[in-house]
Image (cartoon, helix red, strand yellow):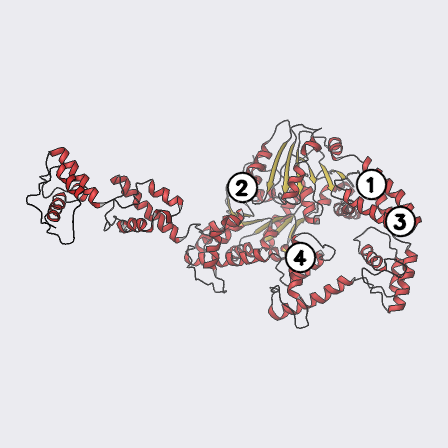
Amino acid sequence: MAISLFPHNQSAYGAAVSMLAETGKAAVVHPTGAGKSFIAFKLCEDNPKKRVCWLSPSEYIFKTQKENLLACGADVPKNIVFYTYAKLVLLSENELAAIKPDYIVLDEFHRCGAEIWGQGVARLLGMYAQAPVLGLSATNIRYLDNQRDMADELFDGNIASEMTLGEAIVRGILNPPTYVTSIYAYQKDYEKLKARTLKAKSKAVRDKAEKILEKLHQALENADGLDVIFEKHMRDRTGKYLVFCANLSHMKKMKANVPQWFGNIDKKPHVYTAYADDPATEQAFKDFKNDNSGHLKLLFCIDMLNEGVHIEDVSGVILFRPTVSPIVYKQQIGRALSASKTKEPVIFDIVNNIENLYSIGTVQQEMRDAVSYYRSLGKDAEIMTERFRLIDEVHDAKTLFDELNETLTASWDLMFAKAKAYAKAHSSLNVPRRYKTSDGYSLGNWIFTQRKVKAGLQYGSLSEARVQKLESIGMIWDNVRDLAWQKYFQEAEAYHKQYNNLNVKAGYITKSGVKLGSWLSNLRTYRKNNIQQNYLTQDRIEALDKLGMVWDVPDYLWEQNYAACMEYHRMHGNLEIPSDYVSKDGLKIGTWLRNQRANKKRLTKDQIRRLEEIGMLWSTKYDRAWQAAYEEAKTYYESHKNLDVPIAYVTASGFKLGKWISNCKAKGKANHPIERQKALDAIGMVWDKPDAWETRFELAKNYFSVHGDLQVPARYKPDGVWLNKWLNEQRQIYLGNRAGKTLTEEQIDRLTSIGMVWEKQRKSA
């Protein structure tokens, strides 16, 4: 069955085909759930005799896209040659030359901006400059990579079709969701407000604040709990819901509440878990997709499903993350939206506390922009909806919170008067944060609050008239920390200008005495732990990125060494890197690989996979040599049923097995690792060398028991022992013809007992 496109994708496809014919490059930027992968599949279907090289971040994304295509009754085109971006990097020149694509598809093309993946894409595009390139992505901007526009870099700005999430909802391409806001944890914030109320210096202020505080407490107490909210708004009680969490510990905490929160909907909901580096994630995700039972299905995720993979039958998402970037936020709520759905999805925005009440404003603004745009063109018919259903379960609490904040802050005019007096006395308004006036007013904190309110970082009212009044007495809206930022950032710029990087050692101090290394180290900590966001803003992160800021030093160093190993593999075809080998960039990758082997348990699943893709062998050369020798010994044992290998024995392959066995014994059993001891024991290893005299006596005794005498033929050689020669030697020792050698009386008696003929009397001692 042929591929059928939705109208919005049909028009995008037509524009892309025309652009490909005209320029050879076309990008389609459509939101999650709009079915943009079908556009690329249609290109393949319409050109069945053309070879299409399809690139994607993962096999799983492509596999899911094919499943979605089959679910629509269409066939997967046979002319696709698929590679992941990671696999593409590893291809040799000959392997690249063998692809010979007529078209190239770059799925999630914003990911091509990654340093290593970008190298592979650049090689492919360079080799096949004449092949038209189609790109698909929900965003062409790499927000954490200097705001790089990959549509400009890869497609020269040739975007055939572009659509925001808000526009897709307005046009009815994606169904408008029911958006429910609520709150999960407020007690700690409430206690802070209570403490501020008790500390209020003015009795009038304190009395008013206490009344508002009581109303806020009642509003929060009377607000429906999450169990009621979920029961009230989860109309699809056997549906599938994605639950986004901040980290692993947060996920565990959220999962522990499943019986309490969802028990009224389903006593035995099916709960799944998906997070990076968990080997069970892929199976859990598959089970979640295939679960068509009559139970509620919950998939708890950590930074998963943000791109590429789309589940058609998701009934909604639950956002438990306290903070999240607008891009990730839209990707996450987009998981519940789909061009093929007929039901209205539900989004639960469950914030963690009073001060972090999240806003759906980003998507709403996109919708307003789309409505204005289509009305300006006279295309009102394109507007299917202007808004979605917003259920604000905490509206009263937000209103009271704002009112309480305003009340607990001293009269604005009073504090302005204090600020004016300070400015007159000090000729500036650079008030230290902890400064209090002589009559106890926290002027420093008030100035700090005005800055936060103006910056939109805190609730409050600051009219333009008030802004002008503050500026008239010397208000600098950049606070003390902002000024400090400028000083440190200028030093960072100077360092970058001199060294062309920002790889500053932690203890580095500039000539002017600025502890630049320590400052950069603190910034890494802030970003890693998602703290100090008012100081380390997104704009500042991007400014540092332009200077080459390395946010995760261990990961950065790992990637550098991995890239050098990949280059070695390209040149030599293996990773048999000598331990003292140093790359052309001065990286000791021989030592680095040894450390990777020793610390494999600490590597992520992705790092292990990537190393194995370039030929990583986790055992050392010594381990592999030992294993090869053991296999030779095992072969000998299977043939001879023992491991009594003569020391001079050499196998058919030329391996000196006798010497190796001898060395193993000489080393001592206890000095071998337990697993090797067991392996050798399993093939008959005799660690303690047997007494030679006893061994030969037993052979003589066996001969006597069979023949009734010791008339041993000269050529008789049991187990490689010349028994006749040994018996004659014992006779000569007995007769005293071997200087320095003697037999014990016991040995003489034992030999006599089995028929030894001594022939003559031995010499007297």
- The residue to which callout 3 is attached is 407
- Residue flagged by tag 4: what amino acid is it? Gln
Residue 618 appears left or right of 69? left
Mark 3 or 2, which is nearer the eye? 3
* View extreme (right): residue: 204
Nearer-N-terminus badge (1/4): 4
Nearer-N-terminus badge (3/4): 4
CA gap, disc 2 to disc 4?
33 Å
Q: Is residue 321 above or below residue 434?
A: above
Q: Do residues under tags 3 and 4 come within 8 Å of each other at their CB atoms? A: no
CA gap, disc 3 to disc 1?
19 Å
Q: Is residue 1 above or below residue 530?
A: above
- Quadrant of residue 11 within the rendered picture: top right
**Mark 2: few/some/many CA within 10 Å (<14, 14-19, 20+):** few
- The residue to which callout 4 is attached is 147
Residue in the foreground of this view, choosing between 749 and 714: 749
Quarter of the picture holding the N terminus? top right
- Residue flagged by tag 1: what amino acid is it? His
Q: Mark 2: which secondary structure?
A: loop
- Tell me if residue 338 can be seen: no
Nearer-N-terminus badge (1/2): 2
Numbered label attached to residue 279: 2
Mark 2 or 4, which is nearer the eye? 2
CA gap, disc 1 to disc 2?
42 Å
Q: Do residues under tags 1 and 4 come within 8 Å of each other at their CB atoms? A: no
Instruction: Give the percent coordinates (x, y) of residue 708.
Output: 11, 33
Residue 102 appears left or right of 381? left
- The residue to which callout 1 is attached is 395
